[in-house]
Image (cartoon, rainbow, N blue to C red):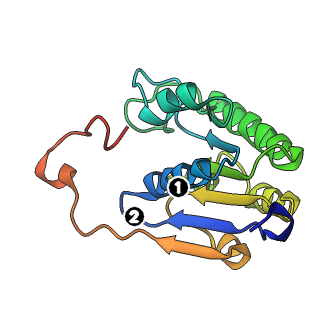
Amino acid sequence: MSAGSRRGLVIINTGDGKGKTTAALGLAFRALGHGWKVLVIQFFKGDWPVVFGELEMSKRLSPQFEVLQLGKGFVKAMGDRKPFEEHVGAAKEALRVAREKITSGHYDLIILDEIIYAIDYAGVQLIRLEDVVGLIEAKPPTLHLVLTGRNAPQALIDRADLVTDMREIKHPWQQKIPAQLGIDY
């Protein structure tokens, strides 16, 4: 199918189960195989002492595959001690970059990883739902746009073409197995 006949989809990976980002990266892998230009913007990852496999792979596949880690880590979780304003500032900058990249016409697939968390993560709001809706509305007709994160609001679900709810049935953390290199990061 040529780019001229392509209809860009809005895809949401949500739910309490693991696999939202992993599924989005699977789409990226598939798209890269077709020669597409892919961008991942991560709203929470960044500023952590962890090497994320997707970031390392993007270095090898650049410029076809880019990963921008624009977050400051999860807010008020996992040992976070940063001022709340720092998280808000990072999220607003990630929104600005996302809008710029979405409207640039340079990409075939853009993944806004964990953007849904930024709307409301454990009662903490970094960005407004209206801002995310605005990103969807700014999307060019041929761009595929993926949003990930738990608890997708109905307003996003209503605007999506494909919504998958990842449901947790069993998780290694329940058996006190820590996050695993290559699987979780």
* 62 left or right of 136 in image: left
* Residue 87 position within the rendered picture, expressed as x and y whole percent measured from the top left: 62, 33
Labels 2, 1: front one:
1
Of marks 2 and 1, which one's residue comes earlier in the chain? 2
Residue located farthest toward the bottom when viewing the structure as drawn: 158
Is residue 152 shown above or below 32?
A: below
Instruction: Determine whether the residue tagged by mark 1 lies in a helix, strand or loop.
Output: helix
* 128 left or right of 51 in image: right
Tag count: 2
Q: Which residue is mark 2?
A: 16
* Residue 130 position within the rendered picture, expressed as x and y whole percent measured from the top left: 79, 61
The Cα–Cα distance between marks 2 and 1, rounded to whole angstroms, is 15 Å
Instruction: Determine whether the residue tagged by mark 2 lies in a helix, strand or loop.
Output: loop
Do the residues bearing badges 2 and 1 touch, measured as CB atoms within 8 Å? no
* 174 left or right of 100 in image: left
Residue closer to the observer: 38 or 169: 38
Mark seen at residue 173: none
Q: Quadrant of residue 168?
A: bottom left
Is residue 6 shown above or below 75?
A: below
Q: In the rendered structure, which amino acid carries the disc numbered 1?
A: Ala
Residue at x-position 62% and y-position 58%: 147
Residue closer to the observer: 162 or 72: 162
Residue at x-position 64% and y-position 41%: 41
* Residue 68 position within the rendered picture, expressed as x and y whole percent measured from the top left: 64, 32
Q: Residues within 10 Å of mark 2 (few under 14, many from 20)?
A: some
Q: Which residue is mark 1?
A: 24
